[in-house]
Structure formats: structure tokens, C-alpha cells
Amino acid sequence: MQKPFNQDSFWSRISYITVLALLTAFGPVCTDVYLPCVPEITQFFKTDPSAVQMTLTSCFLGIAMGQFFIGPLSDAIGRRGPLLISLVLFAVSSALCAFATGIPMMVACRFLQGLAGGGGLVLARAMAVDVFRGSELTKTMSVLMGIHSIAPVVGPLAGSLIISCCPWEYIFFAMGLWGLLLAALSFFRAPETYVPENADSSLSRRLSANLTAPLQEFRNGNFITLVLASGLMTAGFFGFLSASPFILQKTYGFTPGGYALFFSLNSSLLVLASIVTGILVRKFPEPAIVKTSLAILLAPAAVIFAVALVEPQNPVWFLCGVMCYTFISVIFNTASFTVIMSMRKGPSGAASGIFGVLVYTTGSLAMPLMGIMGDTSIVPLGCDMLFTNIVALAIFVWVLARCGNRKENGRIAGGEPGKESPVPEGATAKKLPEKEN
């Protein structure tokens, strides 16, 4: 089996991580490029904002379901095949979105697009877990997040540029081209990282064992509880994604270009936050970073909640609250992923799939609720951000206090320190050798 990168070459390592980062960019590509044209699509189909927001919800639900099935599937047959198929399917479904004749068809095609995009997300995370461990995984995730953060910066600007000179359909043609280019890049730069092998096990047995692995992981109480808590935090950010085009463009009078500019500026904080996370993990354990970041997040969430109640004419407080919330959220997401994955009992593909489906499903449920008080009200978003933050903080503090904070290379729960996660019967795996530190 081919090594994923030359362990002695810095540039080989960075190029491999860059491919993983681009794979995780399916979320921003599906949303940030699309958001500037949401009001235009609303007018084109002569419908209401809540109906168009369903296209966002269906896409995120598709991403969730794709991760749930493709992650365990890759534990049975390897990562590379499902990855390439997912990328081609993403390109095809993006083209179908451009030819949608109504909101129902758009919702269905966006679900299919998200389903394919979910493959890229779950496989990128699983491939990172295959190769890296402990604090090295956290550092890699921070670098990955920093590279990945370029997509939310460029996405809104690209979307605004496209709709300024072309019909909205061309946004989906651009997404399809992105899928094809990434498929070619993955074909040449993303070798297999996980190959199941068992002479006594048939393919059907491996598939059965690995596709039922998520059901076994659902009995892992600490893992599932923290995944749901992470999903609550995602609900706060997804709520902003859903409500921001209407709040900024209708409530505060931003032009599509002005909205895209702010969204890109806000997204650029992801790069800075990734750098800060890489520094923090060298000095503090991940559980401490998670709890501290959640506590700090209460401040910007409270500011946005206060803005929703007071409704000031000047958007400065709202914009500052959103930017602070975004910055700290990246630190939380990066550190919490390592904490959560250290609690898994099964293979990384199944665990990553469960992580994706629960986080994205929980986050998606908040999106249609952002329009229940009209498309200009900030109250639903303020409630969403503040109360999900409070509950997530309480859950993480409770679970981590119960489990105890073990060393970075040990298992926080669900296994003994220093031991690998067990693989379901009939699906033993051969992994790449770990790189030397």
C-alpha cells in the first residue's frame, strides 16, 4: 500500500494535508458560494424565504446522511474508491441543481449534492485519523482548518461575482467544475490510507460488519453525548448561515456585494483562529481548550442575543458579536474533534460518520427556525446562539469531569490508554505506518 506522503518531505506532507483540506471544503462550497444568490432564487421561483432556506437544510441533511453511510462503507472497502465516486456524484448533482424547475426539485437535488459532499467530509476526517494520532492529530487539524478556511473567504466573493454577471444557475455549474477538479486532484494525490484485509472474511461479511458499526458506537454514551453537544454549537453557526442573507441585506440594507465582503472578512478569521489553535495545543490539553472556548463564547452569544432584543439601527454590535463568535468557534471545533474521536470504540470511518450525521443533522434543524418571526427578525438567531452554547458548555463540563482528563495519547473513554480502537469482527485493517515524530 502506497504511503500518503513522504514523511521526510515538508512539501509532500503539506500537499497531502492540502488535499484533505479541500475535501473538507464541501460545506463552505455548498453554502458560502450559494448564499449571495438566495434572495435572487427566492424571487426567481416566486416563493418565500423559508422555502428557499429548505434548500440549505436539505443540503446539510444530505451531507449528514452521506457521512453516516460512506464512513462505515470506507471501513469495509477502503477510502479511495468511495472518495472518487463521491466527487463525481457531486459534480453531476451540482449540474442537476442548475436545471431545477422549482423549489421541490431544487430541494431534492441539493440533498443529493450534500449526500455526495458528505463523502468528501467524512473521508477526509477518517484519512486524517488513519495517519495521525493525539496532539499530532490536533495540530494537523488546525493546519487543515487553516487551509480549508480559504473557501469561506473566497466563496461569497465568488458567488457575488458570478451572479453579478451571470444567472444564478452558473453558481451550480461552478460547483460541478470544482467537483471534477477535486476528483482529478484526489486521483493523483490521495492514495489509500486504510485497507481492510482478512483472508477468512468475504466482502459481504466486511460490509455487514462495518455498516452495523455505527449502531454499536451509538451505545458509547460519552462519545454520543459529546457529539450531540458539538451539534448544538453547529446549530448556532448554521443558524447564522441561514439567517445572515436576510438579516444583513434586508434588516441592515447591505448590498449583495457588501454582504459577500463581510462574510469573507468574517471567514478570514478562520485562518487566524487555526493558527492560534496550533499554538494553544502545544501548551494546553485539548479538554481544557474546549471548556475554556465554550465559556468565552458565552460573551459574543450574549451580545447577539441583546442586539436581537434591542434592535439597534447600527449593525456594529451584531457584526462584532458574529466575528467573535466565529473566531472562538473554530478553536472549539478543532480541539473538540480530537477529544470526541479519542472516545470512540470502533473504527475511525464509522465514528467519523456518526460525528458528521449527528452534528450536521442537529445543526440543520435550526436553519428553518430562523425565519419563524419573519425574514428580518434577529430574535430566533440570538436565542439559537445563546442557549445552544449554554447547554453545550454544561454537557462538556459534565462528561469530561466524569471521564477525567487523561494524557493526549491515552483514551479519554471507551478504551485503555495507548491502545488502538478495536475493529468490528470480519474487518481487520492494515494501516499505514505512523510517521516518526
Image: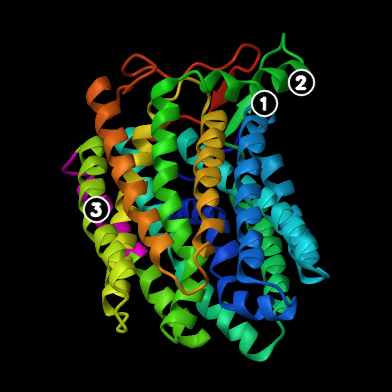
Query: Which residue is tagged 3?
Result: 298
Tags 3 and 2 touching, CB below 8 Å: no
What residue type is disc 2 on?
Leu
Query: Is residue 279 on the magenta stretch?
Result: yes
Relative to residue 348, is residue 283 depicted above or below?
Answer: below
- What residue is shown at x 40% (from left), y 68% (from top)? 378
Could you tell me residue 81's position as x and y percent?
A: 71, 40
The answer to whether residue 84 of the structure is visible from this angle is yes
Question: Of marks 2 and 1, which one's residue comes earlier in the chain?
Answer: 1
The residue most toward the top is 200
Label 3: few (<14), some (14–19) or many (≥20) C-alpha neighbours in 10 Å:
some
> In terms of depth relative to the viewer, which is nearer, 88 or 99?
99
Query: Which residue is tagged 2?
Result: 203
User: In front: mark 3 or mark 2?
Assistant: 3
Question: Of marks 1 and 3, which one's residue comes earlier in the chain?
Answer: 1
What residue type is disc 3 on?
Leu
Tags 2 and 1 touching, CB below 8 Å: yes
Query: Which residue is tagged 1?
Result: 76
Question: Which element type, helix, strand or loop, lies under badge 2?
Answer: helix
Q: Is residue 328 left or right of residue 229?
A: left
Start-end of magenta stretch: 270-284
